[in-house]
Amino acid sequence: ADRAASQGLALSLVHGVVLTVAGIALMPAFLGMFTTSQAVIGLGTRYSNVAFSFTVMIMLGLVFEKLFQSVGAMKTTMASMLCGCVANILLDPVLIFIFHMGVQGAAVATVVGQVASFVVSVVYMPRFKTVQLHKNAFLLRAKTCGNIVVFGLSSFITQFAITIVMALTNN
């Protein structure tokens, strides 16, 4: 379990970097598939650039959340998510209306909420006794990575299919 958790975090780090680069590079073209309005593409690109800039932390935060859930530490998961949600809810109107940041303010509020959840998880992790992260376990091994991919593949396919259906329905 320790090795799987450590390698899951390492894989999420790699995926986060890839998604950051791909998301920032491809978002204008992706948005162009749904609208011809340059104003909408501009707003969507500004929001996504802020959001994708923090993909690594968001991905790692999600791994911590699922790690805590998998061993029944639901109060930790709830506290982490609650901190993020409260930060987002409080910052949205402040950044959008008071600081006049518009869509970028909404993106910053979202990212700050996600980062807050990540920080709560990182702070709690040393007290987490069920699974321990070890430096030497972060070295990726094909067998462990293969097992992680197999377990996550069905969820990925389901989410991907939902996204495609929604995109087709809304287009």
Image (cartoon, helix red, strand yellow):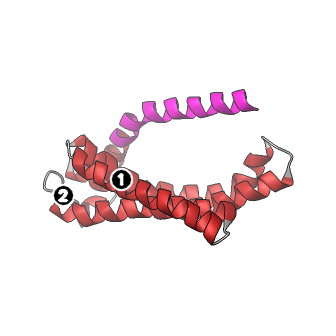
10 Å neighbourhood of mark 2: few (<14), some, or many (≥20)? some
Per the model, the C-alpha gap separating discs 2 and 1 is 24 Å
- Residue 52: x %, y % from top left: 58, 59
Tell me which amino acid carries mark 2: Gln
Chain part drawn in magenta: 147-171
Decide if residue 13 is on the left or right side of residue 31: left
Q: Which residue is mark 2?
A: 132
Q: Is residue 39 left or right of residue 87?
A: right
Which amino acid lies under the numbered mark 1 shown in the image of this protein? Leu
Q: Main secondary structure of the magenta part?
A: helix
Residue 14 x/y as whole percent? 46, 58
Image spot of residue 42 (x, y percent)? 78, 58
Which quadrant would the C terminus be assigned to in this image? top right
Query: Which quarter of the figure has residue 138?
Result: bottom left
Q: Residue at position x 36%, y 58% from top?
A: 83
> For the point 65% across and 64% down, which residue is it?
104
At 71% from the left edge and 54% from the top edge, which residue is drawn?
44
Quarter where residue 128 is shown:
bottom left
Q: Residue furthest front?
A: 98
Above or below, 66 relative to 60: above
Report if residue 54 lies within the magenta region: no
Secondary structure of residue under mark 1:
helix
* Residue bearing mark 1: 82
Q: Secondary structure at mark 2?
A: loop
Left or right of 59: which side holds 19? right
Left or right side of 108 for 169: right
